[in-house]
Image: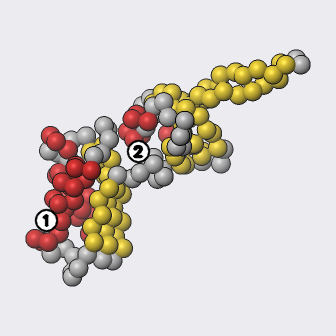
Amino acid sequence: MIEQQIKDLLDKKFSEPDFSDCFLIEVMNHGSRIQVYLDSDEGLSLGRCQKISRFIEAVLDEEQWMQGKYTLEVSSPGVTRPLVFPRQYNKHIGRKLEVKTVEGEKVEGRLAHVGDQQITLQWKERVKEGKKKKNIDVEKEIAFSEIEKAIIKISFN
């Protein structure tokens, strides 16, 4: 119940011009601890998270949606959490992505393109050609409907 109330509340907040590129990833209620994960098309700054957190907190307190003390955490999902919505992919073009398909196949490559229905990953593969080996460029399209899990791989290069 509280999850839906927070979702509805955020829909109102995201209709404001300063927050129109923001969207909700997930609301989790753990009794007295509420976690809200948000994202935006351009990236979510700490300042914007703070403003949204204060907005939610003010309503929680005023409407007394939570009985007693509670902890509210509002943050972006971070790089360890999987991408959930197609609109999250665009800002990661050029980064390495690990995708697990619904058939169980794991594909890892650089996110080259994001379409309306699919993503395109690219990587180099070493193949044997006669007695020599050479690197070839490989490209694979994966439909959003075929993605079970997609995670950004951190590179320290």
Instruction: Kindly tell me whether residue 146 is visible in this rendering.
Output: no
- Amino acid on which disc 2 is placed: Phe
Name the foreground residue: 44 vs 119. Answer: 44
Amino acid type shown at disc 1: Ala
**Is residue 110 left or right of 67 when viewed as pictured?**
right
Q: Specify the quadrant that holds the C terminus.
A: top right
Q: What number is the disc on residue 85?
A: 2
Classify 10 Å Cα crowding around label 1: few (below 14), some (14-19), many (20 and above).
few
Q: Residue furthest right?
A: 131
* Residue 6, horizontal then vertical, whole percent: 24, 62
Q: What is the quadrant of the N terminus in the image? A: bottom left
Give the CA separation, mark 2 to mark 1: 28 Å
Q: Can residue 126 be seen in this view?
A: yes
Residue 119 versus residue 132 in the image, above or below: below
The picture places residue 24, in percent across and down from the top left corner, at 31, 52
Q: Which residue lies furthest to the bottom in this view?
A: 68
Residue 89 lies, in percent from the top left, at 43, 38
Image position of 132 with respect to 56: above or below? above
Mark in front: 2 vs 1: 1
What residue is at 45 percent from the left and 31 percent from the top? 93
Note whether 111 is above or below 74 in the view shown.
above
Task: Report the residue marked by disc 1.
Answer: 58
**Contact, CB < 8 Å: mark 2 with mark 1?**
no
Q: Quadrant of residue 32?
A: bottom left
x, y (%) of residue 150?
52, 45
Secondary structure at numbered mark 2: loop
Closer to the camera in the image, 80 or 22: 80
Q: Residue 146 occupies which quadrant of the picture?
A: top right
Q: Quadrant of residue 132?
A: top right
| Residue depicted at 33% across the width and 47% down the height | 39
**Which residue is rendered at x = 17% and y = 51% of the image?**
13
| Numbered marks: total | 2
